[in-house]
Amino acid sequence: MYVIFENFLSEDECDHLVMLYQQGQSVSGLVVHNKGTFISDEDVLKCDIFDLPLDHHISNKTWHLIEDFADQHKFFINDMVGCQVMKYENNGKFVWHTDGYEPTDVLSMSIQLSHPQDYDGGEFQFGKHKNGNAQQQATEAYDNYKENQDNISPIMTLPRDIGTVWIYNSFLYHRVTPITKGARYSMTNWFHGEKL
């Protein structure tokens, strides 16, 4: 399950988040591997990340959107991990993976902060395993990520319009293809709760 909302953030709001990233202190992206250990592995994830403060008005805006979405789609949401602004450049990527580790990891959100003409590559895609599954627990997806790369095929490439948000089941396979030119900025948030 995934839903797309166009123009969730204005161009000014997207530019503001990119500016915060550029002025803040970013770190290399980490992934969970081997039963919950955080590691840096550029074969899996190559990007830099800036954590947006939880009390920032755009963090609050994502919370209000997910509350409305949850009410309409019968989810109970009780917590969010927090917004991360991500910059992908110079072959930056995130291979096929899922976000859900625990049953309470129910929804993920990604927001496009860059104009489509600012970069080449960097496509956000959902995929399906050749066994027919479109989802898997994240720890299994990471532990078997090399095998999964050959066995998952894209089934949907999402629009690149600035300000567009995608809300999706945290256990769905998805990826960001390698950046071949320019830089792609996006913002991600994750939400805990349960399906009612």
Image (cartoon, rainbow, N blue to C red):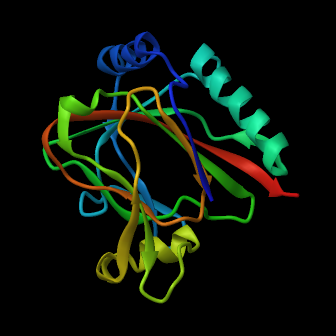
The quarter of the picture where the C terminus appears is bottom right
Give the percent coordinates (x, y) of residue 89.
19, 40
Residue 156 lies left or right of residue 185; in this view the side is right
Quadrant of the image occupied by residue 69: top right
Which of 26 and 107 lies nearest the eye of the viewer? Answer: 107
What residue do we see at 56% from left, 22% from top? Answer: 53
Residue 139 shows up from this direction: yes
Q: From the viewer's perspective, is residue 193 above or below residue 162?
A: below
Residue at screen point 24% across, 63% down: 43
Residue 21 in picture, x, y percent from top left: 35, 22
At x 70% / y 56%, what residue is drawn? 106
Residue 167 shown left or right of residue 94 in the figure: right
Specify the farthest residue to the right.
196
Question: Which quadrant holds the N terminus?
Answer: bottom right
Q: Nearer the viewer, residue 29 or 68?
A: 68
State the residue lying farthest toward the bottom.
131
Which of the 4 image quadrants contains residue 49? top left
127 relative position to 5: left or right? left
Placement of 81 over or under 46, stated as above or below:
above
Residue 77 appears in the picture as rendered: no
Residue 76 percent location from the top left of the image: 85, 48
Residue 134: percent from left, percent from top? 53, 74
Residue name at image x 29 percent, y 81 percent: 150
Q: How many marks can you see? A: 0
